[in-house]
Image (cartoon, helix red, strand yellow):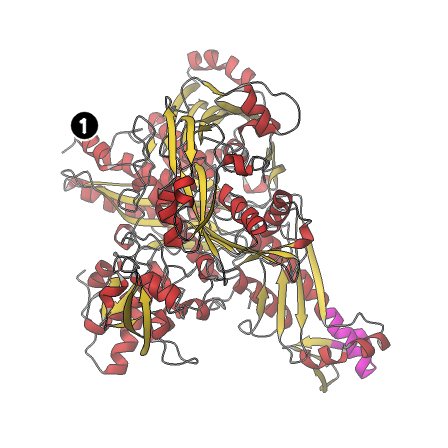
Amino acid sequence: MTTPLRLYVNGDRYDLDVEPRRTLADALRDDCGLTGTHLGCEHGVCGACTVLVDGQPVRACLMFAVQAEGSSVRTVEGLAPDDDTLHPVQQAFWDNHGLQCGFCTPGFLTLITGYLEENPTANEEELRDVLSSNLCRCTGYQNIIKAALAAQRTMNAESGAEPAEQAPA
Amino acid sequence: MIGDRARRIEDPVLLRGAGRFAADTVRSGELHMRVVRSPVAHGRIVKVDVSQALLLDGVVTAWTFDDIAELPAIGFRLTPRPELIPYRQPVLARREVRYVGEPVAVVFATSAYLAEDGAELVDVEIEPGQAHLQADTEPIPWIDAEQATWASNTGDQVAAQDSEATTFVEEYGDIDAAFAKADRLVKKGTHRVFTTEARIGRHTAVPMECRGLVASYDESDQLLVVDGAAKVPFWNREAIAAMVGLPPHRVVVRETHVGGGFGPRGELYPEDVLVTVAAMRLRRPIKWIEDRQEHLVATNHSRGQHHRIQALVRVEDGFIEAMDAEFFLDQGAYVRTHGATVASLTASMLPGPYVIPHFRARARVRLTHKTPAGTYRSPGRYEGTFARERLVDTIARELGLDPATVRRTNFIPADKMPFERPIQAMGTHLVHDSGDYALLLDKVSERFDFPGIRAEVEGRRAQGELVGFGFGYFVEKSGIGPFEGARVAVDGAGQVTISCGASSVGQGVDTVLAQVVADGLQISHEPIRVVRGRTDLFEYGRGAFATRLAVMAGSAAAIATEALAEKARRVAAHEFKVSFEEVELVEGGVEVRENRAQRLTLGEIAQLLEPMNAAAMKEEPGFSADGWFRTDHMTYPYGLHAAVVSIDRETGHLAIERFIVGYDVGRALNPTLVEGQITGGVAQGIGGAVYEEFLYSEDGTPLCTTFMDYLIPTVREMPDVEILLTEDAPSPLNPLGVKGAGEGGTTAVAAAIGSAVDDALRIPGAITSVPIRPLLLRRLVDQVSIP
């Protein structure tokens, strides 16, 4: 038993036929061929599968594909503006050695992008709080925090937003 | 270039989500495999009935042990002691199950969802038996003669076996003589005997990517192609070829991107055999992707050890005359590919940085009805360092000596390097190749102002806080041989490709190898392509384990680069009709010293080496060179971990406020990557010291099968790791002087935190086990008499 589903992913339209039980993560990976969204636990803890649904970070493993009917989904493949330029968050991860194996990275990139777009003036403490929702086993997180702060500076400089408040000492 | 904080060449692909991890390989017509696992820790199989599963649309077939009865148990890759052979794991459970999670049957279906539906329809009936869960109680009967004979697979009858799979001793000096005189020395008052215990909880690597494998038999090429391998693809090719009955040259094993390794991932497991055998039998691509719940009961666990140490110590200065140790390793239900590696390394690395003239360690590897165990980052050293450093702290406190001074007293002096310990480590003679242990302690103490930290801690204590400072010292090992190779090739456009037998588990080996080659050719490292982990594109490779690749593959790449540069100079000398001595390599080209306008780029040299022209120059066609690095000995990096912790009296919460690492890697090929390895290693060490442990109910049911109950540190639990990298003791054993960086972030974390917690509580010897849980701290806090 399948049901028709229309998804908008990274600006492209996908007309799919899916079982109601199919997760959004599986639909993105297997039906849309966007394998950048990774599955690390399939029970909503690790955050590797984080995507932006209408701008909000969600766990794609905990959402059924049919729940995303008509929504606009942004995955890691949709972050960079073109083949020659990385998104500021991606660039900051590269510059700050914010990844090792790279498996959890798409989830961190989408989480940080979604959060900073909504909260451009977040301080370090607030960023740490948000980033504690995803797991990384390689880096010890230190460089992920550095990268998030660097990305925030770039994004705010590009948009002309106020600089971040300093975290309380 | 070597030593630069160069950006990684691996990253752009990964950052765009374009990586190809195990689950990302899709083959048309593929079948998905789902494993039916035992829900019972120990029991006799009464029935495994797949008939209902076979009725489900989309299920193609399902197997139990009878369907694969001709497959032997899985063999050992490392430390293959013969007495372990009867304990090997069958590919599917045979007559009995011995841990929750043991594969009992497999279902193959046209989608992952249907395979899972089918697996739920398999009827498994098991008559439960008593679960044996303690490795440090007396051994029990474990397998009968029939099972032992089958698992040994030699044709000879093997007797029934008990749950002590092996026990062995590593020793030097004369421990019995040393302790024979102990009574007299103790009476005289010059010496004391200390007895300590240490327990390390069962935990493991848990990389963010679960295991997975995709295999398909290509009828056209007559090749079995296996994608998604990791760590040791060359060894696994041989093992898979033997299992499926193909010659090795008909099997191609390819590593794709690997989402973290740390020891368990990439070893040959039952599922890997099932996937490849199914690809041959069913002649359809077979895909298996482990889920997290499976991973936590199926993939190797590690660590669970209990140590007892007796030490004869000089009262005057804390010098350890003799150490007699015994430890119990909770091996779980079977002995897998690592054989006795963890026990062997625990024993041989237990003395660490100290002289200890008389030493004995007795290892006892014991079976339990739990997931089988293997190596995890810093195997044997995390455990042994905790046990040994707890002992040293105990000695210091009991004798009223400064902990740093006691360590200095016991250090192998720098002028005794290289220092041979008459003992074996991973089948090699243990020779500390270089090191100045006291110097590193001095440097770290000065850089991070240990006296200042101590004063601050005392100040806060005076205000009533439970805060403490402690540290642990350790020696690591790295760069095990016996060989690694690399080929450096340049195409007509001047672009460089490195091919090698190395493997990547995400640690950045591509970047480091590119830096080594770029350094030799004086070019940029970023455009270099690195081919590795593919059995069809290189002949030999030993794999990514034991912190060996910077040493082994790095040295091979350096040697190959040197050979390539020589070939370039020969070609240029021939072309410009000058002598070899008159040309030199400068920034990706070769120039005549006296006339710099006479210059050939690497691309031009490659063009000159096309086959016809090369023959005229009496050169082998093609601009490439091979390098091989061989060694019989490991290199021994060393370091120090220190922690400042505070304890909440009300909740027992342990906060790690500061974590400091000093580490000497001989030469840091890329300091940013070395620091990244250390910081990540510390996070894993903190996991084992404070949060992570596989717990079981009395009947052997695992209680930690999700990330809700197996707690990996998040950014909230991690302090900023403060690192001092030093290069005071380059290794004399390889051309780069490098020692490995992969494991030293983890080694002494439990030791340092245990020491700091003791200090915070002011109860010497309070911490004898990890993980240190809030419940224990709450109980200990009540014993703290000082306000």
- Depth order, front residue of B280/A33: B280
- The answer to whether residue B736 is seen in the rendering is no
In the rendered view, does B229 fall on the left or right side of B468? right
> Based on the displayed image, in which of its 4 quarters is residue A112 positioned?
bottom left
Compare residues B65 and B616 and report the one nearer the observer.
Answer: B65
Where in the figure is residue A31, as x and y percent of width and height? Answer: 37, 67
Which of the two residues, B279 or B362, is positioned nearer the viewer here? B279
Region in magenta: B566-583
Q: Residues within 10 Å of mark 1 (few under 14, many from 20)?
A: few
Q: Position of residue B389 (x, y in %)?
A: 41, 34
Residue A42, given in percent of the width and then of the height, sits at 31, 53
Q: Please identify the quarter of the rendering in which residue B415 is found.
A: top right
**Callout 1 amino acid:** Gln
The reply to whether residue B274 is visible in this rendering is yes
Q: Which residue is mark 1?
A: B783
Q: Is B580 included in the stretch rendered in magenta?
A: yes
Q: Tell me the element at label 1.
A: loop
Q: Which chain letter goes with mark 1?
A: B
Q: Residue at x 36, y 64 (%)?
A: A37
Q: Is residue B753 above or below residue A5?
A: above
Question: Residue B728, image x and y in percent?
Answer: 53, 52
| Quarter of the figure with the C terminus of chain B | top left
